[in-house]
Image (cartoon, rainbow, N blue to C red):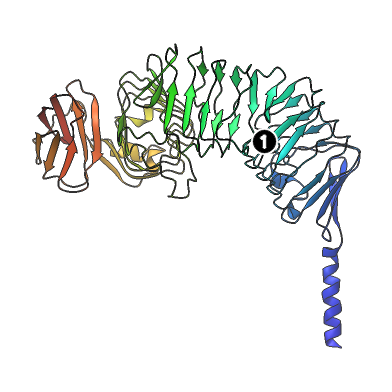
Amino acid sequence: MKQTLLLIAVLLLSLPFLRAQSGTSGPLSWSYSDTDSVLTISGTGAMPDYTEYYSRPWQSYYMKIKTVVIESGVESVGAFAFNSIYYLSSVTIPSTVTSIGAHAFSSSQRLVNIPLPPSLTFIGDSAFYHCMNLAGISIPASATSLGQGLVAYCIGLKSISVDAGNPSYSSFEGALYNKDLSRLIAYPAGKEVTAPEFAPSVTSIASGAFNGCIKLTEISFPASVTSIESRAIEACQQLRTISLPASNLVLAEGFVGEHCTEITSITVAEGSPSYVVVDGVLFNKDRSLLLLYPSRNMVASSYTVPSTVERIADYAFAGGGDATTADVAIPGSPANIYVGESVTSIGKRAFAYRQQLDTLSIAASVVRLDYEALYAIRANYLALYWTNPTTVLYEYGTLHQSSIRELHVPVGTEALYRATPPWSQVTTIIADIPNSSERPSLPSFKAVAYGGQITLSGLQGREIIRIYNISGRLVYARSANGPSMIIPVSSQPSGVYILQAGREAVKLMVRN
C-alpha cells in the first residue's frame, strides 16, 4: 500500500514536466512541449527583440529545444530569440515574417538548413553567426537589407545563393555580393577550395567577408580591388599567403584581424603607390604606419619597429587563440618586440594573443594605447619607459586576460606604477631602467665583442640586456637567463654600441 501511494505521489509530481510550458512574448504566445522538444510561437504581431539570450522567456528550455515552429501571423523574429540553442535542428518560418533580428539564430550549431520565406525584407547583424553546421542559405528576392556578419564563422557553409529577382544582392561562385558584383560581402567559410575566385567587377571587400574560411590557404586580390575594410580577413586558420595588387588600394587598419595564425607572407605587387613590404612586414608607403606583421614571419626571433613608424595599426601583431589556454603560441613569431621612440600610438588589439613573448619593450614616446592593445598577451618581461604612466591615454582593457611575469620600469617609478591601473595588476614590478639623466654606474659584468657576437659574463641572471647603436636606436633586448650569455650581432653593421645590463652600461666596438 505504501509503495502504491509513493508511486502515485511520484506520478503527480511528474505531471508539471509532462505538460507543455507556456507564456507570452510581447503580443505573441509561446509554448514548449517536453514530449517532442518543440517550441511553438503563435499569435499576431512582432516578436520583441531581446538584448541578450538570457532575457528571452523560453531560456529555461534552451538545452532541450530541438524544433522551433513559428506560426502564421508572427511578423518578426526578435534579436537573440534563438541564439545558442544547442540542439536546435529544425526551424519553420511562415510567410508573414518580414524581419529577423540580430543574432536571432547565432551559435545554434546543429542547424543544417533554414528556409527563409519570400516575405523577408530584413536580416540583422550576425543572424546566423557561428552556425557551424549550416550547409547553405538562400536569400529570397524580397530581402533587401542584410546585416554585417550574416553567416560569419559558419565553417560548414558551402554556398550562399540569392534569388535572381533580388534588387540589392547577387551571388557569384557561391559568395554573396551586392547587386552589381562590385562588393564582396561574404565568402562561404566551408567551401572546398584553397583560394577564392572573385567576380571580375569586384572593387571592395567588406568587413567580415572572409571570416572563419578554414579551407583557404591563399588569397590573391585582383587588380580591380581598391578597398579592403577592417577585419575583412579573420579566423582563417589555414591561410598562409596574402597578395595585394598595385592598384590605388586603400587598406583599413586591421584589414587582417585576429586568429589568422598561419600567415607566413604578405606581398604587394611592384609599383604600388601606397604600400610596401620590408622584411616580410607590411607598411604604408612612407613606413609611418605598421599595418601587419604576419603571424609566422620567420625573418628573426627579435623585431625592432623601424624608426620611421609613428603608429602600430589595429591588430598589427595580433595572434589568435583562447586567452585561457597556453597552447596557442605561434612558432616562428618574434619572441622579442621593441617599440622605439618614433612610435606615438598603438592600435586596438595590436598585440592581442601574442602568447610566446619573452620581452615586449615600449618606448616613452607612446602616448596612447587603444582598446585592449595588449589583450591576452603572455610575456616574461614587459619594459615600459614612461617616467609618469598617468600621462598616457589608455582605452579599456589594456592588459585584460594578460599574463606578465615581470614589469620593468624607470628607476624611482615603482610606486607610481603600482598605483596606476592597468600596470598595478602586475605582481612583480622592477624599477631598473635608468632615467636619461642618470649616469650609468661602472659595470660589474664583463662584455667582449668578437667574431660576430658579444659574450657576457658576471650577470646577475635576470636583468634585461639592451643594445643601442650610436644613434640611440634600440637594436636588441632580451632578458638574461643566467650569469653568462652570448648575443649574435653579425647582422649589425660595424660600429660603436652601448650595451646595458639592468642599470649598468658599457660601450663596445663591434667589427663585422
Residue at x-position 73% and y-position 23%? 169
Drawn side of residue 480 relative to residue 96, left or right? left
Residue 160: x and y in percent read 71, 33
Return the residue at label 1: 151
Please tell me in which quadrant of the rendered image residue 12 appears: bottom right
Task: From the viewer's side, name the closer residue of 233 and 48.
Answer: 233
Question: Would you place residue 348 above or below residue 94 in this image?
Answer: above
Residue 435: x and y in percent read 21, 29
Amino acid bearing label 1: Val
Q: Residues within 10 Å of mark 1 (few under 14, many from 20)?
A: many
Residue 289: x and y in percent read 41, 20
Question: Is residue 180 shown to the viewer in this render?
Answer: yes
Question: Would you place residue 6 above or below residue 330 in this image?
Answer: below
Residue at x-position 84% and y-position 76%? 9
Drawn side of residue 265 relative to residue 20, left or right? left
Drawn side of residue 404 relative to residue 238, left or right? left
Question: Would you place residue 265 above or below residue 275 in this image?
Answer: below
> Label 1's element?
loop
Task: From the viewer's side, name the closer residue of 397 and 355.
Answer: 355
Residue at x-position 46% and y-position 38%? 261
Quadrant the N terminus occupies: bottom right
Residue 218: x and y in percent read 51, 31
Question: Is residue 502 shown to the viewer in this render?
Answer: no
Task: From the viewer's side, name the closer residue of 493 and 448.
Answer: 493
Please tell me in which quadrant of the rendered image residue 413 appears: top left
Q: Residue furthest bottom?
A: 1
Quadrant the C terminus occupies: top left
User: Number of numbered discs present?
Assistant: 1
Question: Would you place residue 395 above or below residue 15 in this image?
Answer: above
Please tell me in which quadrant of the rendered image residue 269 appears: top left
Drawn side of residue 249 relative to residue 427, left or right? right
